[in-house]
Image (tube, rainbow, N blue to C red):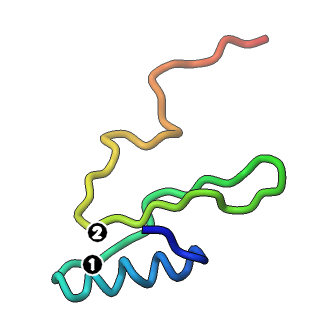
Amino acid sequence: MKFDTLQQGISSYENYARVSGFDTRLYSTKKRKSDGKISLEYCVCNKEGFRETPRLQSNYKRKDQ
């Protein structure tokens, strides 16, 4: 489906979720580098999986420059 605004799309999915018996949550957002506006937003079932490790944690260390 295509919506005129981001909020219309999110509202539609939230209404569908309510009728179907599940909750939603915001999963990810991507912004354009040129102007910082949101270009993509993922809204998923609240039971959608999570990453095993957070993005910022890593087993690798940077070498000192």
Q: Residue furthest left?
A: 21
Q: Which mark is residue 35?
A: none
Q: Position of residue 51 (x, y in %)?
A: 34, 44
Q: Residue furthest right?
A: 35
Left or right of 17: which side holds 20? Answer: left
Q: Which residue is mark 1?
A: 23
Q: Residue at x 34, y 64 (%)?
A: 44
Amino acid type at mark 1: Asp
Q: Position of residue 62 (x, y in %)?
A: 63, 17
Q: Are marks 1 and 2 in contact (CB under 8 Å)?
A: yes
Which quadrant would residue 42 be assigned to in this image? bottom left
- Observer-nearest residue: 62 or 26? 26
Question: Circle 1: is it few (<14), some (14-19), or many (20+) Cα within 10 Å?
Answer: some
Which quadrant would residue 16 be assigned to in this image? bottom left
Q: Which mark is residue 46?
A: 2
Left or right of 40: which side holds 24? Answer: left
